[in-house]
Amino acid sequence: EPEVTQTPSHQVTQMGQEVILRCVPISNHLYFYWYRQILGQKVEFLVSFYNNEISEKSEIFDDQFSVERPDGSNFTLKIRSTKLEDSAMYFCASRSGVAGVLETQYFGPGTRLLVL
Amino acid sequence: QKEVEQDPGPLSVPEGAIVSLNCTYSNSAFQYFMWYRQYSRKGPELLMYTYSSGNKEDGRFTAQVDKSSKYISLFIRDSQPSDSATYLCAMSAWDFNKFYFGSGTKLNVKP
């Protein structure tokens, strides 16, 4: 069964450093998402991406964050200058967007980011 | 007012029990309702998905939606220790563009 994959599974970084989290969405899916989950808290929406542009972003997704689909398979989240409060589990998700196909978001296993 | 409310539990039941998990919501624009299961430090795994009021059954799982009361439920019959996980409700408007999650209910099924 197709699945969303994410790398790395864990990332430790120093405050102020840049990190790039990578995702490979399900093949042929058209919509891509990033969510985060701070330990013990809700899964929170960060950004949605379609047709090579951001379609919606939350107030969390400030200028320190950016997303990119550099090729036909990868979808990345970059945090330019990490803060301690960026420590969280980051989930990538994808959705088909094709008429007649079960429409929901499928989540990857997550990248656990720890900012020291 | 929170968009989605879910009792965090924990909920502890004996093996074989019927489990009832619930969420309430405030936004009338929500049209689609999902239940995800999340094991510790893993990604949410889709369990059930529905878009209308009423019941939807899949094996031991039944999802129930009452749009008039803005209330959704997930029932697990004949619960197993392997069902022990955190259960997240999620919902979205018609465009699926942004999911709103509940805080999750931690379930422990004791052998």
Image: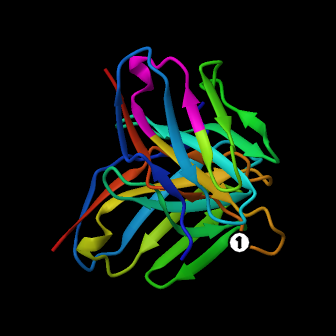
Name the element at disc 1: loop
Q: Is residue B79 left or right of residue A59?
A: left
Q: Residues within 10 Å of mark 1 (few under 14, many from 20)?
A: few
Would you say residue B61 sits in the magenta stretch?
A: no
Residue A88 covered by magenta stretch = yes
| Residue in the image at 45% along x and 71% along y | B75
Residue at position x 72%, y 68% from top?
B52
Q: Position of residue B82 (x, y in %)?
A: 27, 72
Front residue (pair A89, B26): A89
User: Is the residue B109 above or below the residue A105 in the image?
Assistant: below
| Image position of A99 (left or right of A85) | right
Q: Answer with the quarter of the image where residue B19 lies.
A: bottom left
Residue drawn 42% across the image and 21% down it: A85
Please name whichever residue, B12 or A19, is drawn nearer the observer in this view of the structure: A19
Relative depth, front residue between B28 and A88: A88
Name the residue at the bottom extreme. Answer: B59
The kind of residue tagged 1 is Leu
Asked whether, in this view, residue A6 is left or right of residue B15, the answer is right
Quarter of the figure that contains the N terminus of chain A: bottom right
Point 47% across, 85% down: residue: B59
Q: Position of residue A107 (x, y in %)?
A: 54, 56
Which color scheme does this rendered protein use?
rainbow
Q: Nearer the viewer, residue A67 or B22?
A: A67
Q: Please provide percent x and percent y for residue B37.
A: 43, 61
Residue under mark 1: which chain is it in? A
Location of the C terminus of chain A by quadrant is: top left
Instruction: Tell me, yes or no, if residue B1 can be seen here.
Output: yes
- Left or right side of A54 for A11: left
Which residues, given as a range, are shown in magenta?
A: A77-89
> Quarter of the image holding residue A69?
top right
User: Quick check: can you spot residue B70?
Assistant: no
Q: Which residue is mark 1?
A: A102
